[in-house]
Image: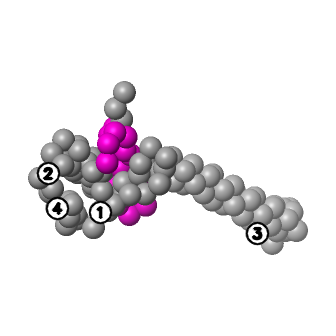
Amino acid sequence: NKMINGSPQNLIKNKKENGSILIFAVLMLSVILTITLTLASIFIPKIHSAVETASSVKAIYAADSALEWCLYGNRYPLAPMPSPAMSNNASYKIYNSGGTEVANCATQPLNYRTVGSSGSVNRSFEVSEL
């Protein structure tokens, strides 16, 4: 006496199942999105760090070149050497002990800080006489 496909009970049951599939799909998408965002928050800083490594190396070489130039100029003031020229788009600045930027390191005593820059990365060295 039961109707197989046309009964009102089967129609209500099918509608409830369709709604549960929609809820299940939304929950699965939420889980996938959460996993994706978590992985992105872990790996994006690592990728950013790896990309900046090349700039960091350029900046440290620029700071080292400027400091070596200061040491040479301070040790041999009568044999001036041209300032270092960076061919890798890095730059450097030289600061005295008071924090003022200077053009060269010829003055005594030897108290300087050199800052190399490449892109958004800065690296510095400091030398001082006791």
Between the residue at mark 4 and the residue at mark 3, the CA separation in whole angstroms equals: 94 Å
Which residue is identified by label 2? 78
Q: Nearer the viewer, residue 48 or 107?
A: 107
Between the residue at mark 1 and the residue at mark 4, the CA separation in whole angstroms equals: 17 Å
Mark 4 vs mark 2: give the one in front.
2
Q: Circle 2: is it few (<14), some (14-19), or many (20+) Cα within 10 Å?
A: few
Disc 3 marks a residue whose amino acid type is: Asn
Q: Which residues are magenta?
A: 107-127
Q: Circle 1: is it few (<14), some (14-19), or many (20+) Cα within 10 Å?
A: many
Mark 1 vs mark 3: give the one in front.
1
- Disc with the residue nearer the chain's start (4 vs 3): 3
Disc 2 marks a residue whose amino acid type is: Leu
* Left or right, residue 72 beside residue 121: left
- Disc with the residue nearer the chain's start (2 vs 1): 2
Coloured how? one colour
Mark 1 vs mark 4: give the one in front.
4
- Disc with the residue nearer the chain's start (1 vs 3): 3
Q: Nearer the viewer, residue 62 or 17?
A: 62
SS at circle 3: loop
Between the residue at mark 3 and the residue at mark 2, the CA separation in whole angstroms equals: 105 Å
SS at circle 4: loop
Which residue occupies the extreme bottom position in the image?
6
SS at circle 1: loop
Q: Nearer the viewer, residue 100 or 76?
A: 76
Point out residue 118 in the picture as x, y percentages from the top left corner: 35, 60
Q: Circle 4: is it few (<14), some (14-19), or many (20+) Cα within 10 Å?
A: few
Which residue is identified by label 1? 90
Which residue is identified by label 4? 82
The part of the image, by quadrant, that contains residue 21 is bottom right
Which residue is identified by label 3? 5
Q: Are marks 1 and 4 in contact (CB under 8 Å)?
A: no
